[in-house]
């Protein structure tokens, strides 16, 4: 399970999603959360290239960093799409309210972490942590 300190970095800072299809792609996201069982969820509103890449191979990396402390982590995992149910509904409502109805949710993405890696610029950089 992800430690409280690591979870805090992801919860309190923007996430950057990295995928690769024909070329690398990285984007920031704001509609995000970590479930109680340690999965990372994202509301996909404007993520066309990200979604195309995930349809090809399902692989994703998520990075977050605290700009004040420079504590940073990266999660690598496999993504799946959710197009109905409570998670989808929650992100659909967020997209509707945030954009005042001008944007709609394409899907929710649920990432099952396979690796958790320290990205902080210190002696632990690249250390793999237990999930």
Image: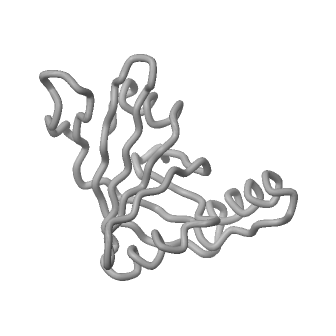
Locate residue 29, reporting x and y percent.
55, 51
61 relative to 118, above or below: below
In-image side of 41 versus 127 (left or right): right
The quarter in which the N terminus is drawn is top left
Tell me which corner region of the image, top left, top right, bottom left or bottom right, holds residue 84. bottom right
Locate residue 121, reporting x and y percent.
23, 26
Tell me which corner region of the image, top left, top right, bottom left or bottom right, holds residue 86. bottom right
Locate residue 2, reporting x and y percent.
33, 37
Q: Residue at x 54, y 46 (%)?
A: 33
In-image side of 30 versus 103 (left or right): left
117 relative to 22, above or below: above
Extreme-front residue of the structure: 23
Residue toward you, 129 or 121 = 121
Extreme-right residue of the structure: 100
Locate residue 25, reporting x and y percent.
39, 64
Residue toward you, 65 or 110 = 65
Q: Residue at x 33, y 55 (%)?
A: 61
């Amino acid at each position: 399970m992800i430690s409280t300190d690591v979870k805090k970095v992801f919860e309190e800072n923007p996430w950057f999603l990295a995928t690769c299809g024909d070329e690398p792609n990285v984007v920031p996201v704001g509609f995000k959360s970590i479930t109680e069982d340690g999965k990372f969820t994202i509301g996909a509103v404007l993520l066309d290239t990200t979604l195309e890449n995930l349809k090809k191979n399902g692989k994703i990396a998520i990075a977050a960093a605290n700009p004040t402390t420079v504590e940073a982590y990266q999660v690598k995992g496999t993504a799946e799409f959710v197009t109905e149910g409570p998670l989808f509904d929650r992100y659909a409502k967020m997209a509707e309210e945030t954009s005042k109805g001008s944007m709609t949710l394409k899907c929710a993405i649920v990432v099952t972490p396979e690796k958790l890696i320290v990205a902080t610029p210190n002696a632990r950089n690249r250390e793999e942590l237990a999930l």
